[in-house]
Amino acid sequence: MNRLELFARDEHRCVYCGVVQDVADLSVDHVQPRARGGDGSHGNVVTACRGCNTLKASRSLAHYLAEHPEARRNFFQYARYVYPRHVRAVAEELARRGVGDVSTELVEGIRGQRRSEAIDT
C-alpha cells in the first residue's frame, strides 16, 4: 500500500488529532515503530498529521497515548484498520499504566472495525 492509498483508506484523517488534512500535511505513522521491530504492513501503519507524528516520534504508542487523552480517544475511534493484536497490546499496556477508561475506548474502536478485521489476530 502506498502513501496515497493509506491516506485515502483513513479518509485523510489523522488518527491522533482527528483532523482531516491535505495530503501535503499528512505522514505515515507506524503503530509499532520500525525502531522497535514494526514493519510497513497495512495493519501497522496509520495516517498521522506531521505535528502528531513528530510529537509521537519513536516512542511506543502506549507511551504517547498515555500522555495525550484526546489522541487516545481518537486512536481507538479512527484507527479502524490497525491489526487487532496491536490495538489489544496498546490497550493492555495503557491498562497496566492505569490510564483512563481504555476498555470502553477499545470496545468502541473494535465496534468501528469491519467484522473480518475484528476477528483477525
Image (spheres, rainbow, N blue to C red):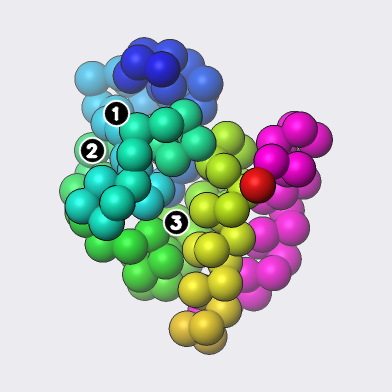
The local crowd at label 1, few if under 14, some if 14 to 19, many if 20 or more residues have their Cα within 10 Å, is many
Magenta residues (range)? 99-120
Mark closer to the chain start, 2 or 1: 1
> Looking at the image, which residue is at 47% across and 29% down?
42
Q: Is residue 48 left or right of residue 87?
A: left
Mark closer to the chain start, 3 or 2: 2
Q: Is residue 62 above or below residue 101?
A: above
Q: Can residue 68 be seen from the camera position used here? A: no
- State the mark number for residue 26: 1
Res 119 → quadrant = top right
Q: Are marks 2 and 1 in contact (CB under 8 Å)?
A: yes
Could you say which is closer to the camera, residue 13 or residue 30? 30
Q: Position of residue 91 (x, y in %)?
A: 57, 66
Q: Quadrant of the N terminus?
A: top left
CA–CA distance in space, label 3 to label 2: 14 Å
The residue indicated by pointer 2 is 50
CA–CA distance in space, label 1 to label 3: 16 Å
